[in-house]
Image (tube, rainbow, N blue to C red):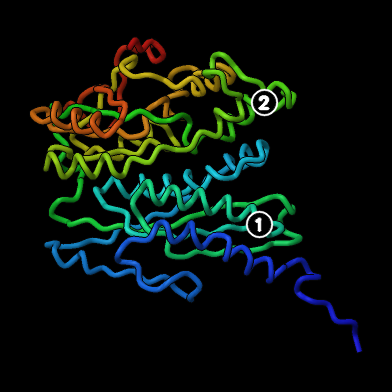
Amino acid sequence: MAEQITYAQAGVDIEEGARAVDAIKDAVHSTYRSEVVGDIGGFGGLFSVGAAKSMVDPLLVSGTDGVGTKLKVAQRLGKHDTVGIDLVAMCVNDILATGAEPLFFLDYVAVGKLSSEAMAEIVGGIAEGCRQAGCALIGGEMAEHPGVMDPDDYDLSGFCVGIVDRVSMLNPETVRPGDVLVALGSSGLHSNGYSLARKVCLEGRSEEEIREAVDELGGVSVLEALLTPTRIYVKPILNVLKAVPEAVHSLAHITGGGITENLNRALNDRVDAVVEEGTWSVPPIIRYACEAAGLDEEEALKTFNMGLGMILCVDAASVDLVEAELRASGEAVYRVGQVVEGGGVVRYDNGGALFDYER
């Protein structure tokens, strides 16, 4: 008879997988909402949609995303408890653009070699992101890929579902000339542009250089600044939509493509957005990356978020109330421009002043 070769000998440790599930249970349970039915470990996550009964025309809104090459920064620094926040943020901030409340989240974690301790860190970050967004982590998958991925390598992807009443959904068709552009500050690069940021900030530099404190980055290292988690805007945005009904006409999540190629998605083909440079603060790590890459303003504005995580198109009559509500939620709020007649594009005024914001 041929010698027996077990699954574990082939590189997949089922027992470690079971330990990993046990290690993440508390973190997962900490995200549960009253609508969660059952527990993790089943073949599917269950979630009651009873809340939709009070809506006129409920719509489910879904989104999926990953963290991209920011994971390489986490692996370089050896810190894995924040990229899960990024994962949740990229999904929930996207569906928030419709005005949807995120309900539940599922994750997919692929690893070269499964470690219950490392998995607890990663999923702990995902759970923290879910708590910040107010959604439940109801399931996921941990896949071990020996021979396909290096033992210390991993990748993340996520999927979320939210709900919005069609009658109150944010809609670019409602944007009109005279609307004011109100922006919320980002925490840094968020999770986009990292192929460029890693190339210009990390490549060719010694470990000592990228780990030492940098004055222009507020006394943190380049690695630490690059790993700052993406800000989650769910609670402040949902709060302002409730507190000032019909004031916000549309919303843009500023991700890959920067302001130039995301704000236009919140417009209709009868208006343009005119963004005034120099009206908001650009985080130090973004300044640092732009300088290292030698980017001109045009390229910077379509590569990084440049310090703005969300931009709202707001009715001019209600803009003061909207800004006050957002500030009360702890957000950095900037009035960055206005909507004018046009053809659905983003334009810039005050060219050359991108980095000239004064508090």
Q: Which residue is mark 2?
A: 211
Q: Is residue 291 left or right of residue 260?
A: right
Q: Which residue is mark 1?
A: 111
Q: Position of residue 124 (x, y in %)?
A: 52, 51
Task: Identify which residue, 324 or 27, lies in the foreground.
Answer: 27
Query: For the point 14% across and 26% down, which residue is it?
Result: 320
Given the image, on which type of amino acid does mark 2 rest?
Answer: Arg
Horizontal relation, residue 10 to residue 311: left or right? right
In this rendering, the answer to whether 344 lies above or below 306 is below
Of marks 2 and 1, the one in the foreground = 2
Q: Is residue 213 left or right of residue 186?
A: right
Neighbor class of circle 1 (other Cα within 10 Å; few <14, some 14-19, many 20+) is many
Please rate how many residues cluster around mark 2, counting C-alpha atoms within 10 Å: few if below 14, some from 14 to 19, many from 20: some
Percent x, y for residue 84? 51, 48
The numbered dot on residue 160 is none
Vertical relation: 57 (above or below) 194 = below
Q: Determine whether, in the image, residue 239 is placed left or right of residue 93.
A: left
Residue depicted at x 61% and y 58%: 110
User: What is the residue that sits farthest to the left in this orientation?
Assistant: 317
Taking the spot 69% from the left edge, 62% from the top edge, the residue there is 145
Query: In the image, residue 142 lies at what x, y percent?
Result: 59, 63
Residue 15: give x, y in percent of width and height: 69, 70
| Number of residue marks | 2
In three-dimensional space, the C-alpha distance between marks 2 and 1, rounded to whole angstroms, equals: 26 Å
Quadrant (top left/top right/bottom left/bottom right) for the C terminus:
top left
Asked which secondary structure carries label 2, the reply is helix
Q: Which quarter of the figure is the N terminus placed in?
A: bottom right
Pick the residue in front: 320 or 28.
Answer: 28
Name the amino acid type tagged 1: Val
The residue lying at 22 percent from left, 38 percent from top is: 269
